[in-house]
Amino acid sequence: MAEHVAHDDHSVAHESHSTKFYWMIGGILAVVTALEVGIFLVESSFSATMFLVILLGLALIKGAGVIAFFMHLRGDAKIFQFVFLVPLLFAFSLCLGFLKLFSNHVGIAG
């Protein structure tokens, strides 16, 4: 005969955020997006490499915000954060490395 075992409540306590909190995060993401567009539209004395590094950095901040709050990675176990963030940082560093490596390359037509 099957024996019933009382289960303890092992549910992980995830933070429950209000709608106001998500609107605030959305507002911050909108401000960072406006900053990106503003940097793109304004003529500046940045080099092309510095321009791309700034835009990639802002994109990384926005991506981290989406991942942490909307995908709820912030409340997950540390191993999930590690498994997700290490390849992301590796890919970001590869992008920066290739930008630096080919910053003076004129291309096939040049």
Image: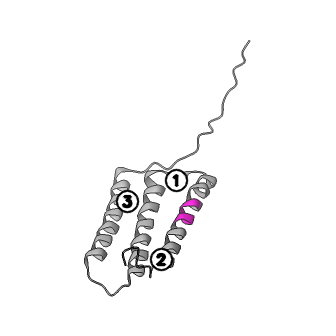
Mark 3, residue position: 25
The quarter of the displayed image where residue 62 is located: bottom left
Q: Give SS at disc 1.
A: helix
Where residue 110 appears, as percent x and y from the top left, is 37, 79
Q: Give SS at disc 2.
A: loop
- Viewer-nearest of discs 3 and 1: 1
Magenta residues, dominant SS class: helix
Task: Check disc 1: other Cα within 10 Å, few if <14, some if 14-19, many if 20+.
Answer: some
Q: Nearer the viewer, residue 109 or 72?
A: 109
Where residue 32 appears, as percent x and y from the top left, is 34, 68
Where residue 79 appears, as percent x and y from the top left, is 63, 54
Q: Which residue occupies the extreme top position in the image?
A: 1
Mark 1, residue position: 73
At 38% from the left edge and 56% from the top edge, which residue is drawn? 21
Is 99 drawn above or below residue 46 in the view shown? Answer: above
Q: Amino acid at mark 2?
A: Phe
Which quadrant: the N terminus? Answer: top right
How far apart marks 2 and 1 lie (CA) works out to 34 Å
Where residue 88 appears, as percent x and y from the top left, is 53, 61
At 38% from the left edge and 84% from the top edge, which residue is drawn? 47
Q: Nearer the viewer, residue 90 or 65?
A: 90
Magenta-drawn segment = 87-91
- Viewer-nearest of discs 3 and 2: 2
N-terminal of the two: label 2 or label 1? 1
Is 45 drawn above or below residue 81 in the view shown? Answer: below
